[in-house]
Image (cartoon, rainbow, N blue to C red):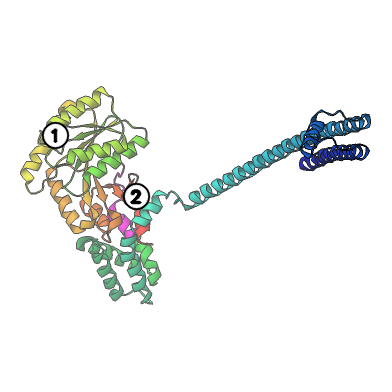
Amino acid sequence: MFKWFKDIFSNEEENIEKKEEDILEKEKEEILEENEPIFTEKEIESLEIKSNYNEPLMPDEIEELEEKFEEFEELEEKIDEIEEQQKEIQEEISKIEIEELEDAKEDIEIEDSFIKVEQEENIEEEKPKKKSMFQKLFDGLSKTRDDVSIKINTMLGAYVKIDDEMLEDLEDILISADIGMDTTMKLIDNLRESIIKEKVNDPAQVIPMLKNEAKKLMNEELDNKVKTDAPTIILVIGVNGVGKTTTIGKMSNNFKKEGKKVLVAAADTFRAAAIDQLRDWGNRAEVDIIAHNEGSDPAAVVFDAISAAKSRKTDVLICDTAGRLHNKANLMKELEKINRIIDREYPSANRETLLVLDATTGQNAMNQAKTFKEVCDITGIVLTKLDGTAKGGVVIALQSELQVPIKLIGVGEGIDDLQQFNIDTFLDAIFN
């Protein structure tokens, strides 16, 4: 629009100039016609130049020029108005663009929030649900269950009635599950008596009856709860490599969750890196560790730990010990010395002596238990690594033959995967 007005104004100026030139040319011609030329060609050209600049315009020309200038001023005003309108329009366009950008930004933010929520929901869905204690036990005993329950069900499916041959096959399966010869013979003999007494002939009834007989052998009256009433001292024993340090860390974590104040004594001063490993578990479980240098007297560590437990009003003091079965005499002396310190320094404390065994060793775990039982008074057994073995049947043998309660079992590597043992849930998990 502005360019158009500018072009019009330029054309008007050119027209005025041309008209002026025409008037001068006409006047010159009239003078030449009336009078003889008195000027040379060069003088005439000079006169034309002067007249272009100095000769006054006629009144009508002045009036016309004034009108043109008025028109020009009006054009300038219109141009100013148009430019102002253009400016207002541009401002409106800018406002609209800003609003559109803000709306687009809001839409993007809303879309991003929906995407974020959807992603969070997907993450929630992808996160595995927290397993119950029974589910952890059930999953952890999958290898034992596959080796026992599936074989038993397959075998029973091949029989239409209960007979001696079927019981012999059942006996072989139980022995292969590391239940042990003595415990297996007792189970089969008791099962046979119950079958005759109750006049059962359906093989489908064998598994419930077998679970019941196993429960009787394991003696459900044994106390399988770890003492934690303040003050309590728990002595943890076992050979190297069975998972004593890990068990202590997991126990500490469980007791802390129950609201107990826990302290740990690193009295296994003979095994390299035992103290450092215990410190790592102490950090994970957020419990304090009382430790001396490697090679120190274990009884001295326990003495200092008891003093600290008293001053800090600790609920549970857990004492790690060295595991050296190759020399029973030294092991016995060491444990006797530690027990004397406890009797003298903390006679009012509740006492627990927990033997840690590796379930993957099967009947070898039974031999270790018998050896330790000869040198100290075991109040309970902790069975680790049940999730990594098909020899879970050793649980039945340990409790039935030793008559020592299994108090804790490890069914995973996580810090929460140490749980209290329960006969019913255990038997349900392997005979399912």
The quarter in which the C terminus is drawn is: bottom left
Residue closer to the observer: 205 or 333: 333
Find out whether residue 394 is within the magenta segment: no
Using the rendered view, name the quadrant where residue 274 is placed: top left
Residue 312's x, y, as percent? 27, 24
Kindly identify the amino acid type of the residue bearing the numbered disc 2. Asn
Q: Nearer the viewer, residue 212 or 121?
A: 121
Q: Which residues are magenta?
A: 212-227
Residue at 33%, 57% (x, y): give it. 141
Local crowd size for mark 1, using a 10 Å CA cut-off: few (<14), some (14–19), many (≥20): many
* Element on which disc 2 rests: loop
> Which residue is depicted at the point 9% across and 36% down?
295
Task: Check the image and report above or below for 120 versus 37.
Answer: below
Residue matched to label 1 = 338
Farthest-out residue, top: 311
Distance between the Cα atoms at labels 1 and 2?
Answer: 31 Å
Asked whether the viewer can see residue 346, the reply is no
- Give 230 or 124, whichever is nearer the viewer: 124
Going from N to C along the chain, the mark reached first, 1 or 2, is 1
Q: Residue at x 27, y 53 (%)?
A: 385
Q: For the N terminus, give its image quadrant.
A: top right
The residue mark sitting in front, 1 or 2, is 1
Q: Nearer the viewer, residue 67 or 316?
A: 67
